[in-house]
Image: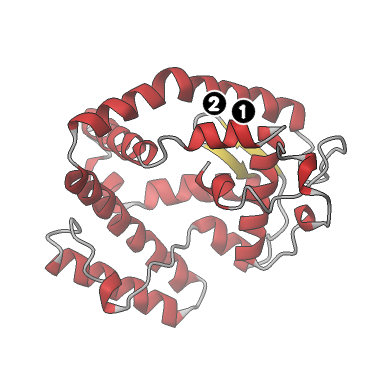
Amino acid sequence: MAAALVLSLTACASVEQRHARDPLEPVNRVVFSFNQKADRYVMQPVAEGYKTVTPEPIRQGVSNVFDNMKDIVSFANHAVQLKPKEALNDFFRVAVNTVFGFGGLLDIASPMGLKSQKSGFGDTLAHYGWKNSHYVVLPLLGPSTVRDAIGTGVDFVSNPLDHHVQHDVPTRNTIVGVNVINQRAQLLGSEKLLEEAALDPYSLMRDTYLQIRDKKVGLQSQAEEEIPINELVNP
């Protein structure tokens, strides 16, 4: 959803023409509709309650801790991709934020010039040749591709937090739940923009996601054709 909002005014694709990267569109639309209802009636109210009772500094600290864990996963993927510069950047981000940021509660690395440049196993698969992948909507997780869905699973099991609590199911579920709710709280209000701006929210979400991912993995997106924006966005 965040990706769709970022490029909602530049995503261009025909609503009437079936997208070549979306052969599972009928199924994907069903899952997309389910996700919207689950978000509207479950995730959004929970996120609003979380935001109401949790001070902003604490929410930011929670985000920083999970972001620090993602930097570890990113370091591993950059190393596998044989990108030493990016891998070293990730390594020092983790070291600085863990030691001087109280375990990652504070982001000390970014002001020092160590930029966040996340990379997952989906990026690693693309780096080694699997650039073009069919679009798929995952239940609750949202837009993805077959490649990125596999990458998401690998990233999850390789996350250090999962290793520490993999045998403690209640704790693991609590950590995952807090992470999801915290991320959803950061996007409160965005769902209205997506629904009100787009004539077809599904197509807008799909085309924007593919544009972002294709750009990152170095693939020219089919969604970047010169098509009038009013085919997807309300006047």
Could you say which is closer to the camera, residue 40 or residue 143? 40
Would you place residue 145 above or below residue 221 in this image?
Answer: above
Instruction: Name the residue rendered at 53%, 51% in the picture.
Output: 151
User: In the image as oriented, which residue stretches furthest toward the right?
Assistant: 17
Residue positioned 67% across, 34% down in the render: 202
| Tag of residue 32 | 1
Q: Mark 2 belongs to which amino acid?
A: Asn
> In the rendering, which numbered label is found on residue 35?
2
SS type, badge 2: helix
Q: Residue 33, how many percent across, how many down?
A: 61, 23
Residue at the location (46% across, 70% down)? 78
At mark 1, the secondary structure is helix
Q: Give how far across and how far down residue 104 sits, in percent.
A: 20, 59
| Residue 169 appears in the rendering | no
* Residue 13: percent from left, percent from top: 79, 46
Residue 150 lies, with reference to residue 82, above or below; the image says above
The type of residue carrying mark 1 is Phe
Task: Specify few, some or many for label 1: CA neighbours under 10 Å numbering under 14, 14-19, or 20 or more.
Answer: many
Check the image and report above or below for 211 versus 196: below
Q: Is residue 209 above or below residue 139?
A: below
CB within 8 Å, label 1 to label 2? yes
Q: Is residue 24 visible?
A: yes
Q: Is residue 98 left or right of residue 205?
A: left
Q: Quadrant of residue 168?
A: top left
Q: Position of residue 44 (x, y in %)?
A: 40, 26
Left or right position of 213 against 41: right
**CA–CA distance between discs 1 and 2?**
5 Å
- Quick one: label 2, few (<14), some, or many (20+) residues within 10 Å? some
- Give left or right: position of 52 versus 137: left
- How are the colours assigned in the image? secondary structure
